[in-house]
Image (tube, grey):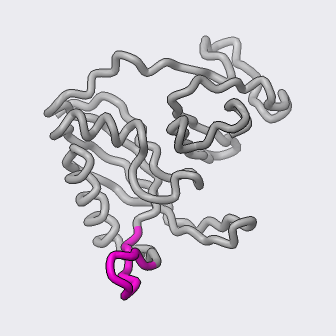
């Protein structure tokens, strides 16, 4: 959040992020309603720009004009915290969340999120199960990565899901839905 003005909350700016680690590289993806200013990041924390890559580091790209229309097919990636909310036994008051460790339950969780968020799954692979601990909050999250293809069923709901994220634990790197064009 240091890339955003003081006093701006993650929720207010719809900030979503995901840290992807491959081999020796760590890539932080950030999506928000406000344009970030990464000037506060120490240069030693950034990879040096490649003379063969025209994209600066850090790169800021506008996402205006992306067509998210009904029936459109897309590849997607989502790191999520698939959970089930238990009853508190106190009327409508929600109880604690329980992680879904079984792959069939994780798949069903995403199918249900699809129904609520304007898409249907065409195919999905579930990988990289991990426990993440946020020490300051004394909180442990179970996360998985979903990769696959989806079809938009309700453009308005889907656009909201892309903007606001899917599922819980958004402050901890979950919920960012990355998209790319797909063919049938």
Which residue does the image show at 40% across and 84% down from the upper left?
Answer: 88
For this orientation, the residue located farthest to the front is: 91
Q: In which quarter of the image is residue 106?
A: bottom left
Q: Where is residue 73 in the image (x, y as percent from the top left)?
A: 21, 34
The reply to whether the magenta stretch includes residue 39 is: no
74 sits left or right of 16 in the view? left
Answer above or below: position of 122 versus 74: below
81 sits left or right of 19 in the view? left
Which residue does the image show at 28% across and 56% down from the upper left?
Answer: 113
Which residue does the image show at 21% across and 30% down from the upper left?
Answer: 183
In this picture, which residue range is highlighted in magenta? Answer: 83-95
Q: Where is residue 101 in the image (x, y as percent from the top left)?
A: 42, 75
Answer above or below: position of 139 versus 166: below
Q: Where is residue 151 in the image (x, y as percent from the top left)?
A: 20, 40
For this orientation, the residue located farthest to the bottom is: 89
Image quadrant containing the N terminus: top right
Q: Nearer the viewer, residue 120 or 181?
A: 120
Image quadrant containing the C terminus: top left
Q: Quadrant of residue 17?
A: top right
Which residue does the image show at 38% across and 74% down from the upper left?
Answer: 85
The reply to whether the magenta stretch includes residue 84 is: yes
Q: Which of 89 and 115 is in front in this view?
A: 89
Q: In which quarter of the image is residue 64?
A: top left
Q: Position of residue 25 (x, y in %)?
A: 68, 40
Q: How many marks?
A: 0
């Amino acid at each position: 959040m240091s890339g955003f003005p003081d006093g701006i909350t993650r929720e207010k700016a719809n900030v979503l992020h995901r840290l992807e680690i491959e081999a020796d590289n760590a890539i932080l993806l950030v999506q928000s309603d406000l344009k970030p200013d990464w000037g506060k990041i120490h240069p030693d924390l950034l990879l040096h720009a490649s003379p063969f890559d025209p994209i600066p580091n850090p790169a800021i790209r506008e996402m205006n004009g992306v067509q998210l229309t009904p029936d459109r097919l897309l590849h997607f990636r989502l790191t999520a915290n698939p959970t089930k909310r238990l009853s508190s036994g106190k009327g409508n008051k929600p109880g604690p969340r329980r992680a879904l460790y079984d792959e069939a339950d994780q798949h069903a969780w995403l199918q249900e999120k699809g129904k609520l968020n304007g898409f249907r799954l065409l195919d999905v692979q579930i990988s990289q199960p991990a426990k993440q601990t946020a020490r300051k909050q004394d909180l442990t999250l179970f996360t998985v990565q979903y990769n696959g293809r989806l079809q938009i069923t309700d453009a308005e709901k889907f656009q909201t899901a892309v903007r606001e994220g899917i599922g819980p634990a958004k402050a901890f790197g979950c919920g960012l839905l990355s998209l790319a064009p797909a063919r049938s």
